[in-house]
Amino acid sequence: MNKCHFVGRLASDPHLVKTNNTHLVKFTLAIEDHRRDKDGSKKRRVDFLNFEAWATAAQTIDTHANKGDFMAIESIARRQSFNQEAETVSFRVTNFKIFNNNKLNEDNE
């Protein structure tokens, strides 16, 4: 089964493009991890993961998500090879929820 769940903050505003008669949005999520090292002191680590969403999900994310918003993402992992030396993993969004949305809060005021 290929299913991944993440919660993090948008590292920048999503980037929407139209490709092959549909919409694609790409964005980066900053995922925080807190662990204790050998000495027992708490360490914070942040990983930046790349996501893509298609069609109506892409339009919704572009319209309602901004840099700094929390998002809960359900996705599938996709391996991408650009050449034999460079290989990356990105995540295709299958479900999402946006939290702390400033655009929605401005509309309600």
Image: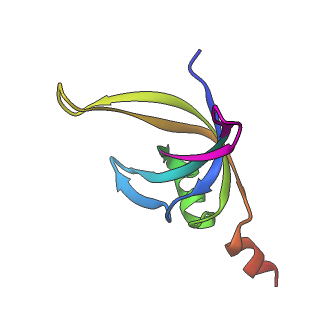
Residue toward you, 94 or 84: 84
Residue 28 in percent (x, y) is at: 48, 52
Residue 69 in percent (x, y) is at: 65, 62
Residue toward you, 74 or 84: 84
Viewport quadrant of the N terminus:
top right
Residue 107 lies in the magenta stretch: no
- Taking the spot 71% from the left edge, 37% from the top edge, the residue there is 40
Residue 59 in percent (x, y) is at: 54, 58
- Taking the spot 43% from the left edge, 61% from the top edge, the residue there is 15
Q: In which quarter of the image is residue 16?
A: bottom left
Residue 37 lies in the magenta stretch: yes
| 36 on left or right of 53 | right
Q: In which quarter of the image is residue 103?
A: bottom right
- Taking the spot 37% from the left edge, 56% from the top edge, the residue there is 18
Assign the magenta stretch its main secondary structure. strand
Q: Give the range drawn in magenta.
A: 35-48
Q: Which residue occupies the extreme right position in the image?
A: 109
Residue toward you, 60 or 31: 31
Residue 36 in percent (x, y) is at: 68, 37
